Image (tube, rainbow, N blue to C red):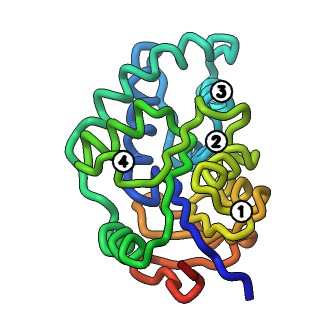
Amino acid sequence: MTAYRAVIFDMDGVLVDSEPVFFEAVNELLKPAGKRIQWEDYQHLLGSTMSHTWRSVLETVGLDVEHAPRYIEAYGDTLLDLLRRPRSLIVGVDPLIADLKRQGIPIAVATASRLAWAEAVLGEGAGVPLDTFDAVVSREQVENGKPAPDLYLQAASLLSVPAEQCVAIEDTIPGIASAKAAGMYAIQVRASSTALPPIEEADAVIDSLEQFPLELLTP
């Protein structure tokens, strides 16, 4: 049995129930065009790159996908205002982080969000400074977003732990694919309001971080 030595968290939908905010921001920007995307059409885009998300959104609502760069440019400011609202960490996050720190297990965040969004969600919204984690890797720090392994490989490198000795905690299909491509043990957590059905490719599926299998870890 592999002795896992580090834990790497996705952010949105794992640490904070923030995915609905991204959905809200998308519809705020579609409003002037008299358009709205429904949740059932948006849900399958969770964890996707911003470029793929916006091209898919515009195609779904019947707008020209060539306008995607304009929407992406406006998206950041709209989203930041919404992400800064006070919000709680998902149940189980605080005690798990405390347990990991107590055991001397390195922890990181590997998020498809931008660093400014991570600071807004965690630092400003949830009151958790980014330096709570030993490393934070955001989308603009790597060449390829999820489902490519870049984010997780960079996080493992910053922790100085081989990728195959890391546990990744994810909630989306692209996220699980990214962690698996990096060679990590991938756990799907289904604790947010946007939780997906169990993902077949995940190594384990839990309904709360309170169920995280600490026995996997060796300091």
SS of the residue at dot 1?
loop
Q: Position of residue 10 (x, y in %)?
A: 52, 55
Q: Nearer the viewer, residue 158 or 42?
A: 158
Q: Are marks 4 and 1 in contact (CB under 8 Å)?
A: no
Front in this rendered view, residue 94 or 175: 94
What kind of residue is marked 3?
A: Ser
**Quadrant including the N terminus:** bottom right
Q: CA distance from mark 2 to mark 3?
A: 8 Å
C-alpha span from label 3 to label 4: 29 Å
Rendered residue at 42%/78% (across/down): 103
Query: Which of label 2 and label 1 is nearer to you?
Result: 1
Q: According to the image, label 2 marks what residue? A: 48
Q: Which residue is mark 4?
A: 131
Q: Disc 2 residue type?
A: Ser
Residue type marked 1: Pro
Q: Quadrant of residue 8?
A: bottom right
The tag on residue 162 is 1
Task: Please tell me whether mark 3 sits on a helix, a strand or a loop.
Answer: helix
Q: What SS does tag 2 mark?
A: loop
- Distance between the Cα atoms at labels 2 and 1? 25 Å
Q: Decide: marks 1, 3 in contact (CB < 8 A)?
A: no
Upstream in the sequence, badge 2 or badge 4?
2
Q: Earlier in the sequence, mark 1 or mark 3?
A: 3
Residue 82 rendering spot, x and y as whole percentages: 30, 33
Q: Which residue is mark 3?
A: 51
Q: Which marked residue is nearer to the observer: mark 2 or mark 4?
A: 4
Marks 2,3: beta carbons within 8 A: no
The image shows residue 92 at horizontal and vertical percentages of 34, 73
> Which numbered disc flags the more N-terminal residue, 3 or 4?
3
Q: Mark 1 and mark 3: span between their CA atoms?
A: 30 Å
